[in-house]
Image (cartoon, rainbow, N blue to C red):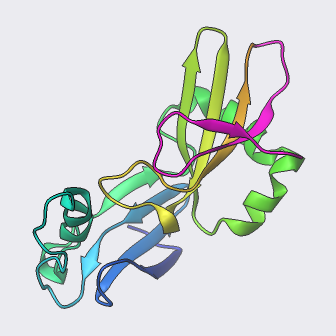
């Protein structure tokens, strides 16, 4: 890696859990690190499976696994459309807020489409990207409207008043 910037973001369940994020051009490299190497600090109780999955994803330094994520997604044919939505003036508050912005996904079905962005600081393993804002339109000839996805939901977009 030819790292331009490296930071560590505090993570849940233990003061030893951190997410190192390395920036290399248009790529992010992220890992889940447990500095102490202890097992997950979430009890084995019914209903806590997802929390244990999140807590268990943090690895000791010797077992660190890096994941690479392209900032604009892994579909080059969509990069122009993604860049247009990213530059939309209505998206200025999100651009100012996001430290590690990344394309979360592009949804399309029929004639409508949605382009969702996230900030990698808030994404947790075993869950959908948590913090998602973007644009949707109902048809190719209709304007893009600012939307957000509800936390922990895959498909529950809500228009954002502008």
Residue 11 lies, in percent from the top left, at 39, 77
Q: Hey, which residue is sitting farthest top in the picture?
A: 110
Depth check, front residue: 91 or 41:
41
Residue for point 27% across, 77% down: 33
Q: Is 14 part of what is drawn in magenta?
A: no
Depth check, front residue: 152 or 128:
152
Depth check, front residue: 145 or 141:
145
Q: Position of 69 compared to 161: left or right?
A: left
Q: Point out the stretch of residues depicted in magenta.
A: 140-162
Q: Position of 95 compared to 98: left or right?
A: right
Image position of 43 with respect to 29: above or below:
below
Q: Position of 160 compared to 32: left or right?
A: right
Q: Hey, which residue is sitting farthest front in the picture?
A: 46
Number of numbered discs present? 0
Q: Is 144 part of what is drawn in magenta?
A: yes
Residue for point 40% across, 63% down: 29
Residue 94 lies, in percent from the top left, at 74, 58
Image position of 134 with respect to 112: above or below:
below
Q: Tell me where residue 72 sits by quadrant.
A: top right
Residue 20 lies, in percent from the top left, at 39, 76
Residue 132 lies, in percent from the top left, at 59, 50
Q: Position of 158 compared to 128: left or right?
A: right
Q: Which corner quadrant holds the N terminus? A: bottom left
Residue for point 80% across, 61% down: 93
What is the chief secondary structure element of the magenta stretch?
loop
């Amino acid at each position: 890696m030819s790292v331009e910037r490296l930071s560590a973001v505090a993570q849940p369940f233990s003061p030893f859990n951190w997410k190192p994020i390395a920036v290399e051009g248009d790529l992010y490299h992220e890992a889940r690190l447990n500095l102490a190497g202890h097992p997950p600090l979430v009890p084995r109780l019914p209903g806590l499976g997802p929390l244990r999955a999140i807590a268990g994803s943090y690895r000791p330094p010797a077992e660190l696994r890096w994941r690479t994520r392209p900032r604009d997604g892994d579909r080059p044919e969509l990069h122009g459309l993604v860049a247009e939505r990213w530059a939309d003036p209505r998206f200025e508050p999100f651009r100012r807020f996001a430290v590690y912005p990344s394309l979360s996904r592009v949804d399309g079905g029929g004639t409508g489409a949605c382009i969702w962005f996230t900030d990698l600081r808030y994404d947790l393993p075993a869950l959908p990207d948590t913090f998602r804002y973007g644009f949707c339109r109902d048809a190719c000839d209709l304007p893009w409207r600012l939307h957000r996805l509800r936390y922990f939901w895959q498909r529950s977009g809500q228009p954002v008043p502008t």
